[in-house]
Image (spheres, helix red, strand yellow):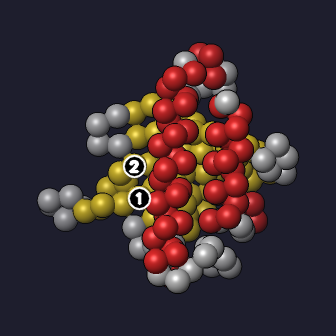
Amino acid sequence: MMSNVAKQIYRQIDDLFPDLQHIEPFTKVDLSSKGLPDIQVVVFESTPDRINFILSRYCQKENGRLVANPSIEISANPQTKTANVVTYKDDHYFHAATPKAIEIGVLAQSQANGFLYDFLRDIKTRQKSMGQERVEGITI
């Protein structure tokens, strides 16, 4: 079952960010020009079999400071067309995954992936309401 969710997450990522694999590592992408001013992507690693990146939504705190809430590190595998949460952080919770799902617990991984799936669906809904289907031609 977890494999099925990982494949669904990958499809959402690929649909939302089709150029992700072509972004140079250590590049921060501001998506405000695509109608998503509070969403940023930072790519850490991009190889044919692994894309490691952080997807963050920014919100403004009372003091006016922008903070990432949540910030989700994701590992995607273009070969197997799967993606999973590596780390998840928000104001109240931090979850760090290890390479072996059994070490973090299947329930914890499932919950983190479930949140990511819903988060990606929310981004897509926001884009559609603004008349955009995909984040294409990301400029760096």
Tell me which corner region of the image, top left, top right, bottom left or bottom right, holds residue 61.
bottom left
SS type, badge 2: strand
Residue 70's label in the rendered image is 2
In the image, residue 101 above or below residue 22: above
* Furthest-top residue in this view: 103
Q: Position of residue 129 (x, y in %)?
A: 46, 77
Q: Quadrant of the C terminus?
A: bottom right
Indicate the position of residue 43 as horizontal and vertical percent values: 62, 56
Point 52% across, 23% down: residue: 107
Looking at the image, is 13 positioned above or below residue 108? below
Q: Which mark is residue 81?
A: none
**Nearest to the observer: residue 63 or residue 9:** 9
Whether residue 104 can be seen here: no
Classed neighbour count for the residue bearing mark 2: other residues with Cα under 10 Å, few (<14), some (14–19), many (≥20): many
Q: Secondary structure at mark 1?
A: strand
- Give the amino acid at mark 2: Pro
User: What amino acid is at disc 1?
Assistant: Arg
Q: Nearer the viewer, residue 15 or 98?
A: 15
Camera sees residue 89:
yes
| Quarter where residue 91 is shown | top left
- Asked whether disc 2 touches disc 1, contact meaning CB atoms under 8 Å apart, the reply is yes
- Looking at the image, residue 135 lies above or below residue 103: below
At 46% from the left and 60% from the top, the residue drawn is: 122
Depth order, front residue of 75/121: 121
Residue at 75% across, 60% down? 21
> In the rendered image, which residue does mark 1 sit on?
57
Residue located at (59% from left, 16% from top): 103
Q: Quadrant of the N terminus?
A: top right
